[in-house]
Each structure stands twice: as C-alpha cells, then as structure tokens.
Amino acid sequence: MKVNILGFNIFSKGGTSRSNINLILSLLEEGNQVTYFNELPFDEDSITELMIYENIYSENLQIKNFKSDKELSLGDYLIITRETLFKHAQNAKYYNRKIKVIGEIHGPLKYLPFNFEEYLIYIDVVRVSTESIKLKFKEMYNYDNVFNLYVNTRHILINNEPSNTRRNLLIKSRFEDNIKDISYAISLVNYVAKNNPEIDIHLYLIGYGPSELMYKNLVRYYNLENYVHINEKEPKNYIYLSTSSYETLGYSILEAISSGNKALIYPGNDNVLKSIYNSYEGVAFLTKNVTKDADILLDFLRKRYTKDMRANDINILKNDFNISNYASRFLANVDSLIKVAENKNYLKKVRKRRRDKDKDRYYAWYSLLRNKRFFKAIFQNSYVKKYLTNYYTYRLNKYTEKIEPLKDYIFIESFHGNNFSGDPKYIGLAIKSKFPEKQIFVSSKNSLVDMEIRYFGFTPVRLGTPFYKEAFKKSKYIIVNGNTLDKVGKSSKQIVVQTWHGLPLKKMVGSLNDKEERDKQLSAFLPRMKKWDYLITSSHVNLRLLKSAFKLNENPTLKYLNEGSPRNSYLINNYTEKEKSKIQLKYFHYQNTKKQYILFCPTWRKNKRLSVSEINLKKLLLYLPESIDIIVKLHPNESHLRYKYSNLDERIHCFYNELVDIQELYIISDWMITDYSSTIFDYAHLNKPIFLLNEDESEYRKSIGFNFDIHKLGYFPIANNDEEKLANQIMKLRKINYSKLIERLMSKDNSLSDIKVVENIIK
C-alpha cells in the first residue's frame, strides 16, 4: 500500500513528532510505501539527523516538503496528523476521490479549531486515543467513523526495577502554559516549600516554548531559586509530575512509568488520563486544590514503590501498549469503517484565497505601509485617514454581518485583558453557575492573566490574535468594562454588555474641565459607545454621571440595567472568615488569622513618577505592630514600580497586577489608603476605614475636576504625611459606617446583582 502522511514538523521534539516517527517505522516494517510531507520547510541535514538518530532510513520512504494538495492525493491512504491541516483533505479528494483520508486527533477535543467541523466532512475516518474520547467526539460532531487506538510506543523500553525518591519531581514538556499548566506545579512546590521547611523538594522543568520566561519570573516571584530548576541536568530518580488540564495520552507520563519512575498526574478536566492510568500502582492523582495536593504529594513521596507493585504495572504496560502488527491494525480499523461514497463537495476545489480573509489582508497591508516614509505622510492626511477609516469600517461591518454568532459562546474582557477581575469576571462566574454548558472566552494580554482565567475554568484568548478575533465574532454575548477593539467590529446579532469599571468620582471624557481634551476624547469614544446594548449601573446618580461623561443619549437603543454591580455581590456574599482564609492562602501561601493588612492603592498619574506617594511605607511599619503588613496595589499603568515595592521590606507586598483581583484584597484588608480612586465606593460596602491621600488634590481638581465632594457623604480621614501620626490614625480606627454613601451612590448593589444582570441579558 502507498501511504502518504501530512504532518507539521517531524524534526521538532514533541509527542506528535514521536508518534509520526513510530507510525512510519511500523508502516515500513509491514511492507508499505510511505511518503511523509512536512509542512514546515527543512533542509537535507535535517533528514540526515533523523536517519542517524531514529534509524528511519528505507528505500520505501520519502520525506518531502509539502508543496501541493495534488501530491498528497497520489496514494491509497492519506493520514493527516495535525487538526489544523485537515483543510487539505478537500483538495486531496478533488484530485483523487478514491484515496482514503484519515484524520488523527492528537490534541484534546477542547482545543480543536473553531472551523474544525467545516473540514471534517472530507475526512473518511478519524483516529482518537481512548474509548471515552471516541464517544465524546461522536456526540460533539455527529460523526460515526471514529476508532480508538493508542499512538505507537515502539521507542519506549520497560525497566523492570522500581525507582524511589523522596525529593525530586520532573516535568518534561513543551513550555506552553495554556495547555500544560506548569504554573500550577510551580505554585504547588511553592506551597509545600513555604509550609514544610523540613522537606527538601526539587522540581526540574525540562523543555522549551513561549512560557519559559513566565516560569522564570514565577520562580523569582515566589523566591524558589533553590527549589525549581529550569533546563538543568535531569535527575535519575524522580516522580513525574503532570498538571495539564487536558491530555490524550501523555508520552512523557508513559515514558516515566516505563522507566520505573512513579507519576503524579492531574486526571484532566475530562478524566481521560484517569481512564488510562488508574490501574497503575505507581500512579497517584492530583485535584488542582493546592492544600489537598500538597498532602497528596507528601504522602506519595513517602510511599515506597515495591517490586511487586512494579511487576503489576509492567503487566498493564505490556497489555495496553502492544505494538505488534500496529500498522496492520491501524489500516484494518480504517477499512472496516470507511465508506467510499461519491460526494459532490469533493469535486469543488478550494479557492486559495477565501473572501472572509480579505478584511485581515487589507488591514495587514495598511499596518505594513503606514510606517513607510512616503505612505506615512499620506495616511496622516486627515481626509485620507477619514476615508480609509470609513472604508475599513464599512468592509468590517459587511463581513461581520455575515457571521452567525453562537448563543452558547460568551466573550469577556476585563481591563483590556490586563487582568481578570471586575464586573465581567463576576458576570462570567454567574453565567457559568446558571448555564454550565456555555463556552466562555476571556481576553488576556499575557500568560500570567491566562493563569487566573484558567483557574476559574474559562478559556483565555490572547488579545488581538486570530483566535481572539474568531472567538469574539462567534460569541453572541460580549461583556466588557472598557471599550472593545475597533478591528473586531460588532454584528447587529451580538449583544454588548458594558459594565464600566467604577463609579466616577473624578470627571472623565465628556465632563472633563479641559475643553480640548474633552473634545478629543469624545471624538474617539462616541463611535465605540454606540456599540453598547446594555449598560450596568448601581444607582440613579451613577447613571446620571455616566450619561454626562459618555453622552449616552447619542445611543438611543442603549438599555440601562440598574441592578447594581456584580463585583460587589461577591463582596457582600463573601465577607467571611472562611473567604479571608482562602484569599490569604492564594496571595501569601499561608493562613494566619492574626495577620492584618493595610491596602495602599493610589490611582494613576499621567506623569512618570518614581513613587506613588510621599509616605515612606518602610518607615510607617516601624510604628505599627508586627502583625500588620502593607499591600501595595498599583494601577496597571504603573506596574513598572512593582519591583521597587516588592523589595522594600518583607512586610510590604506588591503582587503582579495580572494575578490580582482587588475585590479579594478588599476582603482581607482591614484599612485602605487611597486618593481619587473609585475603589472608595466598593470598599465602603465593608465599613472599614478609608484614608485619603491629599498630596496633590488642588492641582488634580484644577486639571481634571471632581463630580462631587466625597467628604459630604461620609467620614474619610486625611492620611497624615508624618508616618508616626499616620500609624496612630490607623490604630485608632477599626470601623466607619459608610451606609449614607452606599444609599446615595450604590443603592442597587446587593447580594443578587450578579444573578439579576445575567437573567436580564440571557433570556
């Protein structure tokens, strides 16, 4: 038989490359002719190295650069080993309708591309890893030609001797945290090390990929340089650690077990790994609850892996991963399922350029040319700029209207992807609770934000990427607390819910004192505001202030949901000792009921400052009891100051903004020091003292302006600039009643605001 295989890059490290090599060797061993097509370009040296290291040479094997679909069609079978390459099946069928096309699913079903189903009709048979994945695939896609067969494991050698260690953990993986969640493993080691100083624990991370820098930053952030080792020498004896949210097999897990080492595995959100490895004596399972997993890890380190246990595991390995006649069994599964039926769709060749890509093509050309000297001058002409903007908007709207958004898709963006918090987060959690079947995508600027998003079971999408645009356009409901990206547009079939990000104490946009700045901001703001379908408010005063600032009358179809702020439902419902203990564990990795915290969170200034206040925080601590620490919460625009504040003193804490939800900090903090920030209104719900900085109030009042005098609505003591006097102020105040402020400005905030908002939006 002549078998063609299309893969992404057989020359790279990784499970799919290993699977392709093993499959090729099995096919050759059983007398087949194999042509492998590599999507990524390569040179002759790469083939030479593959032959030397994998012993893959044969006269019946050709390895080629992938150039055309026509070449793929010249055979009896075509095996496509990457889901994003399934699109080539249609043209292969166009050129040779008799060719049998097999699509291999190597990734979790959760991560299949949006347009996957579009190409599935041209695939004759699909191979998946396990029976449970097969059943789920059939259910998801109403597609019956599926068989389950593990990938070939011919390269794995079984060691008869069990290996034991009381200190070493190992992860060998691509550093791609959205998929592998290695950040959780680092957090787990951090918790164990901080709470069990007598334990000598070491985590070795071996791999490469886009998240490597993030892992190094986390190691520094947690001060784990003596515990976590990235790409250092691999230990001989170890417990293999897997924290992936989804896996279809996990070659590295299998390799570790086969070599005689134990494995500590998260079973996956779909429990696939538990179905594969549950019978092994040398395997235990994580829960993704750090306190429980710390106990599981410590018990597993102490547990001895005996020869009898090892003998049992070897029997399971030999039975489950039998490689004899692998190629014959593979093709027999294909032949038993396949139905060679005429399909008129096969006869339609795919156009090289799809119309729905035109919009991105035009934008790409503009992005390329706008910085060229000649074109830059043209594009800066106001008439040209206006024409291009109008034309692009017209094309974008025309394209967007063709897309039918899915009612089960929700898109959330908090603070332009800078972190995951605020009303959009709590609306998302309420939706998840009420409608667990809905798919929720959350915008993210970097991998630290991804960590927070994944923790709550949502799917992070990188801001501005093709996946971001696709998720946005496919989602029926868009929930934001700022403006959406211009380049994603908005369909009339979509519903945009605007929560804004705080009650405005200071003037903004259309109510600014400076006319020139006011007109400039309004000009940019109004077209974006007109995309809104719902606006959430906390009181009639709140709505009045937003109407003044945003000129909401310019959007006559806008509906107002005066149901209160969902983020404050969380505060009202969770101001408990249990929640405080949980939050303390998240941020400090310990639980201590005697600890108290001052939350220090001045708002942003446009000028580049080297310090957020004149107050010397280190000096302030000298006058406060040892039981009181300070948390510095920086504005996202001043994140560059984190290093300064996180290194001042061991009692001063400044976390990565990406990992912070300020609502949580409100709950654990006993006092707050701020200035003109809208944090005042949320924190007031807890009736804990709020001290106001008065360092540049007169200048701020003149340049920006205030909507009202906060001091007429409650007691807000002015923070003394003398550190000793400020310490005395703090120690004398434990509670302040802010009910008058809440009644006037946040009257609609209640324990059910999040639920009521969801019920109004999603019918």
Image (cartoon, rainbow, N blue to C red):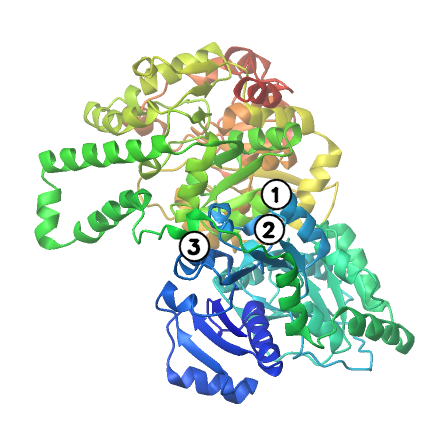
Structural crowding at the residue carrying mark 3, measured as other residues with C-alpha within 10 Å and reported as few (<14), some (14–19) or many (≥20): many
Task: Give the Cα separation between the discs numbered 3 and 2.
Answer: 21 Å
Provide residue 461's location: percent of width, then percent of height.
47, 46
* Residue that badge 3 annotates: 90
Q: Nearer the viewer, residue 743 or 653?
A: 743
Indicate whether 467 appears above or below 273. Answer: above
Query: At x 76% / y 80%, what residue is drawn?
Result: 158
Question: From the image, which quarter does the N terminus lie in?
Answer: bottom right
The image quadrant that residue 103 belongs to is: bottom right
Q: SS of the residue at dot 2?
A: helix
Task: Give the Cα separation between the discs numbered 3 and 1.
Answer: 21 Å
Q: Nearer the viewer, residue 678 or 531?
A: 531
Q: Amino acid at mark 1?
A: Met
Residue 442, can we see it? yes
Q: Amino acid at mark 3?
A: Gln
Q: SS of the residue at dot 1?
A: helix
Residue 5 badge:
none
Query: At x 74% / y 51%, what residue is drawn?
Result: 287
Q: Are marks 1 and 2 in contact (CB under 8 Å)?
A: yes
Q: Nearer the viewer, residue 167 or 257?
A: 257
Residue 140 badge:
1
Q: Amino acid at mark 2?
A: Leu
Task: Give the Cα separation between the discs numbered 1 and 2.
Answer: 9 Å
* Residue that badge 2 annotates: 109
Q: Is residue 174 left or right of residue 387?
A: right
The image quadrant that residue 620 belongs to is: top right
Residue 635, can we see it? no
Q: Nearer the viewer, residue 111 or 374?
A: 111
Provide residue 570's location: percent of width, then percent of height.
63, 28
